[in-house]
Amino acid sequence: MFIFVPTMKNIRNFCIIAHIDHGKSTLADRLLEMTNTLNQREMQSQVLDDMDLEREKGITIKSHAIQMEYTARDGEKYTLNLIDTPGHVDFSYEVSRAIASCEGALLVVDATQGIQAQTISNLYLALGNDLEIIPVLNKIDMDSAMIDEVKDQVVDLLGCDHDDILCASGKTGLGVDEVLEAIVKRIPAPKGDENAPLQALIFDSVFNPFRGIIAYYRIFNGKIRKGEHVKFFNTGNEYDADEIGVLKLKMQPRQEVKAGDVGYICSGIKNSADVKVGDTITSVATPCTEAIAGFEDVKPMVFAGVYPVEADQYEDLRASLEKLRLNDASLTFEPESSLALGFGFRCGFLGLLHMEIIQERLYREFDMDVITTVPNVSYRITTTSGDVLEVHNPSGLPEVTKIDKIEEPYILAQVITKTDFLGNVIKLCIDKRGVMKNQTFITTDRVEINFEMPLSEIVFDFYDKLKSISKGYASFDYHRTGYQASRLAKLDILLNGEPVDALSSLIYADHAYDFGRKMCEKLKELIPRQQFDIAIQAAIGAKIIARETVKAVRKDVTAKCYGGDISRKRKLLEKQKAGKKRMRQIGQVQVPQTAFLAVLKMD
């Protein structure tokens, strides 16, 4: 079998960036079809999205890479490396590493929807890495396509000519041949020295149960040979390159992969912490002097407790999370326990979608039913003695007297919406403690607004509310800006004077009273009546701010008194009262599972 080995001037590395649902995966399918990378038997829709979950939700969760061979119109043969990227804001670190591995990007814009928030944020990432941008207008075959209007939006955003914008349809394949020609003509060939020390950037990794972790990389300088002794620059670990090769739909082994190309390495690594996305691979014999810039550990944004429904499944849950982390390096977890829910894990996620995906994958891939506690963010506490602590859980908060200040993470939120919904969107952001930074009209009926707001306000129901008040038209993107001091209070829920740790929350002081009252009312409906009164209280420190009482189930002890003196009835009632008091002292209040779940869903 003849293997085409490209020279560096005939390699093109590119990615596709777009907002969710703008047809990125469908366009990739057509590119694979037109370059004959797959035959008709292997072809299916969204071929690069290999998880069932990705197909069902219509989103890309893991970035993928695939190599195509293309013969241009002038007869020259080219190797095209497509590094597919997720579109959702929760996976933006993966997007940034994929962008750093490329020289060019296809900016896909839906002709029926126009430019959206994540299109802009991913574009800025690409421009920050000096990528050559090829704008592509997708879905031009749709009746609702606004081709001229969206072209004007792209020209305003990029400052390019109308003629530079390619029109295509990922569904029908119209104009895809022009896209392939533009990739070859406009995207520059990779630069690099084959004879320099090896420098390769890891942009992704996957776990194979038989072969361990397989790292995907792009070589900037030097070359890597099969069997070579290599080192991971930031972790300092050394391995043998048992197998190297290039990424077609399936992995194809090679004896050597050179500068400018994209490939994979198998070296029998079993621990996910050893392979970090953004790390640099170099040779042990002739190491490079510095790593490729841009490496950082993935920082979780949202934290939640994950507990097994059955207490005896704790070890199974631990094994499931460890296997899942091998496939998804951005998941972090550590053991924790709760009086109400037993033993479980405190997990860190990149965002709410990431949390939902992990929960769904635990159920589908490992058959694990779990209870997830209220999602919250990490807070920075400065104590009176000057120590700085990071707290992911309200129960880990020091005593109130020892806290000097509490800081919470802030974000810059970017919302693009139609002007008809502008007032409602601004009101929603202000209600969520947002401060408006600026407002820009992209066209006469589309506006971009930027708000600075606390991350904790958007992790719950912000996105759902934004979609409902804008009838699905608003798009939303955000990035972290740092920490700011806030007036936060720890809200405890007490049952008969005993705090329930799983229901504790850190909340903005001005919202605490309303939230505490709603929680007490909800719990009163859900906690079953006992033989004694149950006091449900919401407290901030020693101050009770709301109270509800679940009345005791009482037997009518006076039923057998026919006539006679009232003192007989009073004596029986007093005896019953003393019994209830004694029962309350030894009685335990069991909070049903439904109560936890209902409180989580409470608006």
Image (spheres, grey):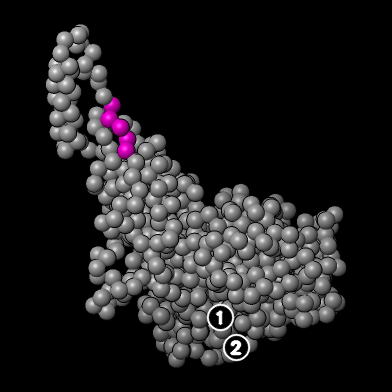
Q: Quadrant of residue 311?
A: top left
Secondary structure type for disc 1: strand
In this orientation, which residue lies closer to the viewer: 25 or 377? 377
Amino acid at pointer 1? Ile
10 Å neighbourhood of mark 1: few (<14), some, or many (≥20)? many
The residue under the point 56% across, 51% down is 53
Q: Quadrant of residue 303?
A: bottom left
Q: Earlier in the sequence, mark 1 or mark 2?
A: 2
Q: Residue furthest front?
A: 565
The quarter of the picture where the N terminus appears is bottom right
Q: The magenta stretch spans which residues?
A: 549-553
Asked whether, in this view, residue 380 is left or right of residue 386, the answer is right
Q: What kind of secondary structure does the magenta stretch mostly adopt?
A: loop
Q: How many marks?
A: 2
The residue under the point 40% across, 62% down is 509
* Magenta residue check for 551: yes
The reply to whether residue 64 is in sight is no
**Do the residues under discs 1 and 2 have CB atoms within 8 angstroms?**
yes
Amino acid at pointer 2? Gly
In this orientation, which residue lies closer to the viewer: 330 or 173? 330
Q: Is residue 9 above or below residue 531?
A: below
The residue under the point 41% across, 73% down is 485
In this orientation, which residue lies closer to the viewer: 594 or 27? 594
The reply to whether residue 430 is in sight is yes
Asked whether, in this view, residue 83 is left or right of residue 547, the answer is right
Image location of residue 556, percent across then percent down: 25, 18
* Magenta residue check for 552: yes
Secondary structure type for disc 2: loop
Q: Mark 1 = which residue?
A: 219
Question: Which numbered marker is on residue 192?
Answer: 2
The residue under the point 24% across, 47% down is 498
Image location of residue 561, percent across then percent down: 19, 11
